[in-house]
Every structure is written in C-alpha cells, then in structure tokens.
Amino acid sequence: MLNMNIRKIAVVLSIVFGLSAMTACGSTSPQANTNTVDTKEDSTSQSTDKTAEEADTTDEKAGTETDSAEGKTIRVAAQSYPLYSPINAAYELGYFDEEFEAIGASYTWTEFASGPLVNEAVAAGEGDVGFMADLPAIIARSSGQDIQVVSGVSTGERSLAVLVRSDSEIQDIKDLKGKKIAYAFGSYAQHLLSLVLDQAELTFDDIESVNLGAADSPAALAGGDVDAIVIWEQFITKLTGDGTARVLIDGTGIKKSNMVLYAVNDFASSNPELIEAFIRATDRGVQYINENPEEAAKILAPRYNVTEEEMIKIFGNFDFSVSLTDEDIKEITTVADYAYEAGIISNPVNGSDFINVSYLEEAGY
C-alpha cells in the first residue's frame, strides 16, 4: 500500500491542501452549498425551546440536564443520504425537537452535500456536530480539528460497492488492472477500493484513478467515461435497479463501512447533555425504521430521490445503531492506520483518543 505512484502522491497533496483551502474560505463557501433550516419558535408545535419549569415534570436527572442546557443551541452540520437514515428520520419525525425541548435547548440544522463540506463548516467554527463515514472524519481529525467520534449511526457491508456497466467485460476484480476507476478521493470508497485491489494482488499503480463525487459518477459510468465506480447507497440500488450497472464486488467480508457522529471537543465537554439528547433522538430514529420500515420509507424516499420500494431495499443493506462496539472501534482504528500508511493523512490518528463512548454511556447505551 506504500508503493503508490506519483499520481497518488499528488492526490494526497491535493486532499491535504484542499482541506486547508476550504477551511480558509470561512462561512461563504459552505452556505452556498447548503440548505439551512432554523428551528421554530415557541409558538409552534415544532418548538425547539422549552423552559426549565416545563421540563421539570421529568425525573431528577432530566431536571438537572434542563438546568444546565437551558437556552443553549447545538449546530448540526447534516447530510441527506441513506447512510444517515436514523438521523434524517429523527429530524423528519420531530424527535430532535422533542429531545431538545425536554432539556430547554434548541438546535439549528444545516445540510451539506458531502462529508468534506461538513468538515469545512466545522473547521470554520460553524458546526458543533457532524456525521459522515469513518475516513473523512479521520482526515478531519488528522488535519487538526479537535473532534471526537461520540456515537455510531450505521454500518453496512453491502452499502458500498464497486460497480461496472451491465454489459462490461469486467467479470473479476483482477480484470480491474489497467482500467479507469472513479471514486471520491479521501472518501471511505477509496479504502474499499484499496482492500479490493489488495485481494486482486493489485495496487493503485495498476489502475487509472479518477477523482469523482458520487453525484457525477453514475453518468460517467453510463457514458463510458470510466470503466468502474466505487459508490454507496442510494446509487447502488438505483443503478442496479434500472439496469445501468451491476455489482462487481461490495464490502461483504471486507469493510464494515462505519458511519459516525462526531462532536467538537470543547462544545461536547461543556454541553454533554446536548450531545446525549442528540444520541437519544437518533436512537429513536433507529427504532422507528426497524419497527416501521414501510412508514419510514414513505418519509425518507423523497429525501433521497428514490421510490418507496427502493428505500425498503436500501434499508436491507444497513444495520442502524448508535452503539460503538469493540468491533466498531477496531474497524475505525484500522481505517485510521490505513489512512496514515497510505499517505492520505500526514498525522496519525490514535483510535483511543479519537473515539469517546462516554456520551453514549451517559445517554444509556
């Protein structure tokens, strides 16, 4: 993995300097690519403010949390992909409103098109929590952002895959040699591709890498501009369902694909009750999807531009959970080690420092 070619080194440099450049952009760039949703005031049923007196009807612990959280706001840097369905469901169902109301707090919700844009906003001081795949979070930590992973969101070995056109001559992963493969550099798709190439006894020297985001990859594959793409849900289900592509290999037995929630350390340590409330709302989203998949599909399908039938199928490719098991921690640590060894990050990330399960424990998980 360390014998990458000059092109790979250039890619690494572009990631490092690109993140720095994005950080320097301040508030202008992320806002141009996002949809900001301000929470409603007390006059509506979706209020995210509640007084301490109203919350005191709960148990003693909740009363204590209300006193310390009263009037505080948490800024959520969000993404709208099936990978984060429990969080998106919690938002749509009003669970965040309810959990933050219960402790007298409020929240703002700003949606971004990708993990790097979430990292940019957080680095610019415009977000307190964000959620994304393991590798982008690791890149953010390595770049100097003082963040910690505080809960899980989902895993899914089949939610990330290498796709080829339905009529492609590529039948085996060894056939990827010499082929043009598109993936988002610095994304968790890059890690899956690395593992697949290892299995095929190939390296990045043996392929032509193309830096392409998930939104642009389907057209590139369909048009023959690339031979394969590495992509996640909802794109896997849509492209295989309409006959454009087929799965060459997914993450089964290779990569767990952890989606995580991270928080800025200063904010989290000063406002643990807000982090715990976020986790509780997310877990309610998990339970709703697990117990009401058809209703959840109706709610979330429009968000992801898929049919309800496709949404049900997509749910089947994920395990949704806020928990961070020993296996999860080991997996994230392995990804961090890979990122450093491969030169994707210049500063190593220590898994035990990067992952903090205390907020989960305090929230009762």
Image (cartoon, rainbow, N blue to C red):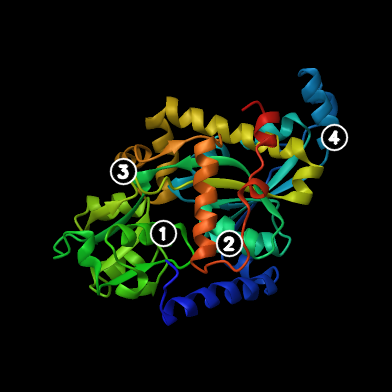
Q: Quadrant of the C terminus?
A: top right
**Any part of residue 295 in sight:** yes
Q: Which residue is at a point 24% across and 70% down the rendered structure image?
A: 177
Query: Which badge, 1 or 4, comes first in the chain's sequence?
Result: 4
Q: Amino acid at mark 4?
A: Ser
Q: Quadrant of the N terminus?
A: bottom left
Q: Which residue is mark 4?
A: 68
Marks 2/3: CA distance?
32 Å
Query: Which badge, 2 or 3, comes first in the chain's sequence?
Result: 2
Query: Which badge, 2 or 1, comes first in the chain's sequence?
Result: 2
Q: Which residue is at a point 63% across and 45% down the rendered structure image?
A: 355
> Where residue 137 sits in the image (x, y, percent)?
58, 56
Left or right side of 332 for 250: left
Q: Which residue is at a point 24% across and 52% down the rendered structure image?
A: 240
Q: Which residue is mark 2?
A: 139
1 vs 3, front mark: 1
Query: Which badge, 4 or 3, comes first in the chain's sequence?
Result: 4
Contact flag, marks 2 and 1 (Cβ < 8 Å)? no
Marks 4/3: CA distance?
43 Å
4 vs 3, front mark: 4
Q: Residues within 10 Å of mark 3 (few under 14, many from 20)?
A: some
Q: Which residue is mark 3?
A: 310
Check disc 1 and report its element: helix, strand or loop: helix
Q: Which residue is mark 1?
A: 189
Residue 224 higher or lower than 151, as above or below = below
> Where residue 51 sits in the image (x, y, percent)?
82, 31
Query: Which badge, 1 or 3, comes first in the chain's sequence?
Result: 1
Left or right side of 80 for 27: right
Marks 2/1: CA distance?
14 Å
Contact flag, marks 2 and 3 (Cβ < 8 Å)? no
> Where residue 118 sits in the image (x, y, percent)?
60, 59
